[in-house]
């Protein structure tokens, strides 16, 4: 294939917005479309190469995968190795377990599937995932498994028939993407069937270019068409925001723009002159390594620090990304791609060994739950109360009726914050005179209850809403209070809680150093907490911030013994439930409503 420098320039146009978007610069919120542009480029290049090899009768599946291994794996293995070392040093157990899962999935080019399956309420925030970006490699490699086989099966087809097949598959994939982006957005974002149309756009461009079907387009049209393509890509980068569904019909703007650039940014056009100039081409050449390095650099900068990294630091890390990319391109990518010293047997053997090694490390981190003894000491192994799964034990109390006659009955409604509240009670009070039922599926307002919900409410002595902010029941606070009081029942709303921007820095401290450490509460959490407190009368409100927070809006993140209060910045460990529960529940009107049950465990200093 004849080298086209403007395509390397297009790579630069794709990778730089991705980097700046993930660095958090709001002007590049639409930078995520750079990945879509990469898909188009990949589809074009791989189809061009395969069509040429098929036409010349020299296509080989082994040769194809050898080239993919040379191109993809050396730099990827380097980044995975560096990320693994940093993760071992810096991550708390839950986060390290999550990293291990990503390491295993990335080794199998299936991180897109893992992210689709694990995205949800408990998923770790994306900015703290060092290998998050490898989902796109999974999409590409899965395409590369199927696409050569498709071309082999259709090798006797006429070009027009092949173009029709590509167009049909693209339309089906795009239709699936448009539907799924509304009905199942996570599935749409990560999986090949809803992304294939982007790669196939590149394939159709390759077929058109090879067959010279565009010769009928007058040369005078190249200029406006290539500039239109450039404008379309830039408009998406600068104009799209988080509300744009991806992939969907909206993504036709940057992807069709990329096709126009590929087909018409030819020598003599301004777009070619711009994209084929020295700087864009240089960045395009190292774009793969730049893409690999940027997410780990950004994620570990967030993981290591207590506070959100400054814009200045993120800009500096963006620059460091290009420095590391150039180094790995020159001393890792290029030697493995072009050196005759690395034969096919070596490439396949090393690829298999590296994949098995990283998959094994990842599996170990998953099965060991992130090696808690690495942070908490040998005694921590097997202690379930330090994980977010401690929160889920409350699901055992999601039942349809209270069963005890000799207990104060407490109905707790909400999400995982409500489950934390139940755990606070279980750790703060002896349960001899208490019975808790937890539900997350009832209407917000007491006057809307029916069926089983109404029966549970009728049995309850106390109703508690806890959702971390302006959640269930808040919109009808006054009605709920009036209805409950008329029935002789008590209603309470639990305040929000948050333990700061990041907790992973605690992994590097000894238990003695962790004792009574604090984190500043993030502004959005504080604002939500204040909004909730303003909406609920003080006599019906159980504040967490006001009873636990220290001066200057700082939350303790460990108790006096150095035991961590939260595993993930939001929820409570068992020690956290003890610490927070005693301070929030003891010596309150709520405790009196419960009948002053016996207290458990002496208050921690």
Image (tube, rainbow, N blue to C red):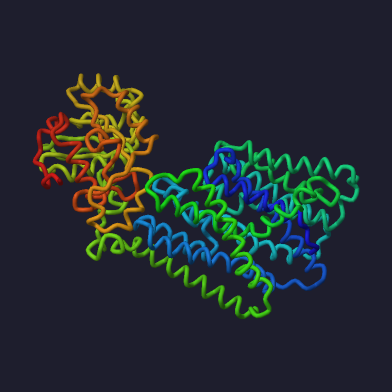
591 and 505: which is toward the camera:
505
**Residue at point 87%, 52% (across, down):** 213
Residue 103 at x, y percent in the picture: 47, 62
110 and 253: which is toward the camera:
253
Residue 405 at x, y percent in the picture: 12, 37
Total number of numbered discs in the rendering: 0
The quarter of the picture where residue 233 lies is top right
Rendered position, 173 above or below 411: below
Rendered position, 47 above or below 331: above
Q: In the picture provided, is 450 more to the left or to the right than 82?
A: left
The quarter of the picture where residue 294 lies is bottom right
Residue 441 at x, y percent in the picture: 35, 36
Task: Please identify the quadrant where the N terminus is shown.
Answer: bottom right
Q: In the picture provided, is 127 more to the left or to the right than 65?
A: left
Q: In this view of the protein, can residue 471 be seen by the observer?
A: no
Residue 286 at x, y percent in the picture: 64, 59
177 and 222: which is toward the camera:
222
Q: In the picture provided, is 227 more to the left or to the right than 459?
A: right
Q: In this view of the protein, can residue 551 be seen by the observer?
A: yes
């Amino acid at each position: 294939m004849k080298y086209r420098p403007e395509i390397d320039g297009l790579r630069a146009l794709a990778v730089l917005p991705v980097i700046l978007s993930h660095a958090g610069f709001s002007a590049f919120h639409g930078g995520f479309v750079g990945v879509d542009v990469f898909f188009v480029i990949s589809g074009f290049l791989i189809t061009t190469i395969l069509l040429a090899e098929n036409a010349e009768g020299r296509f080989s599946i082994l040769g194809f995968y050898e080239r993919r291994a040379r191109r993809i794996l050396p730099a990827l293995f380097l980044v995975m190795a560096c990320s693994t070392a940093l993760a071992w040093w810096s991550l708390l157990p839950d986060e390290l377990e999550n990293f291990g899962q990503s390491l295993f999935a990335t080794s199998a080019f299936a991180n897109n599937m893992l992210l689709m399956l694990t995205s949800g309420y408990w998923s770790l925030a994306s900015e703290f995932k060092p290998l998050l970006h490898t989902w796109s490699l999974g999409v590409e490699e899965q395409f590369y498994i199927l696409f050569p086989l498709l071309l082999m099966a259709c090798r006797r087809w006429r070009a027009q028939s092949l173009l029709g097949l590509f167009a049909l598959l693209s339309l089906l994939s795009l239709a699936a993407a448009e539907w799924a982006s509304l009905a199942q957005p996570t599935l749409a974002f990560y999986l090949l069937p809803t992304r294939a149309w982007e790669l196939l756009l590149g394939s159709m461009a390759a077929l058109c270019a090879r067959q010279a079907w565009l010769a009928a387009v007058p040369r005078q049209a190249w200029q406006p068409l290539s500039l239109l393509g450039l404008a379309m890509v830039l408009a998406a980068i600068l104009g799209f925001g988080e509300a744009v569904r991806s992939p969907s019909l909206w993504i036709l703007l940057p992807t069709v723009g990329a096709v126009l650039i590929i087909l018409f940014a030819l020598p003599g056009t301004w777009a070619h002159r711009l994209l084929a100039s020295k700087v864009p081409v240089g960045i395009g050449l190292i774009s793969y390594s730049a893409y690999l390095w940027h997410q780990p650099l950004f994620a570990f900068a967030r993981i290591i620090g207590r506070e959100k990294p400054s814009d200045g630091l993120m800009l500096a890390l963006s620059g460091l990304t290009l420095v590391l990319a150039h180094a790995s391109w020159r001393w890792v990518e290029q030697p493995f791609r072009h050196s005759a010293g690395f034969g096919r047997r070596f490439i396949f053997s090393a690829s298999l060994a590296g994949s098995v090694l990283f998959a094994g490390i990842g599996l170990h981190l998953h099965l060991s739950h992130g090696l808690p003894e690495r942070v908490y000491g040998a005694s921590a192994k097997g202690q379930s109360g330090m994980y977010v799964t401690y929160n889920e034990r409350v699901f055992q109390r999601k039942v349809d009726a209270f069963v005890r006659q000799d207990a104060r009955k407490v109905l707790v409604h909400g999400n995982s914050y409500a489950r934390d509240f139940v755990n606070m009670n279980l750790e703060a009070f002896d349960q001899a005179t208490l019975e808790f039922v937890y539900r997350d599926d009832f209407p917000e307002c007491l006057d809307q209850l029916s069926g089983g919900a109404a029966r549970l409410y009728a049995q309850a002595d106390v109703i508690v809403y806890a959702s971390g902010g302006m959640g269930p029941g808040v919109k009808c606070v006054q009605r709920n209070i009036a209805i409950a009081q008329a029935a002789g029942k008590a209603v309470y709303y639990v305040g929000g809680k948050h333990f700061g921007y990041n907790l992973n820095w605690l992994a590097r401290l000894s238990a003695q150093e962790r004792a009574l450490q604090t984190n500043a509460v993030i502004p959005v959490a504080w604002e939500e907490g204040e909004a909730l407190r303003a909406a609920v009368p003080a006599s019906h409100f159980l504040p967490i911030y006001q009873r636990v927070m220290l001066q200057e809006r700082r939350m303790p993140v460990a108790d006096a013994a150095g035991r961590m209060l939260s595993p993930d910045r939001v929820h409570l460990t068992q020690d956290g439930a003890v610490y927070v529960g005693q301070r929030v529940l003891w010596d309150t009107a709520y405790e009196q409503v419960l009948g002053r049950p016996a207290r458990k465990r002496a208050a921690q200093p």
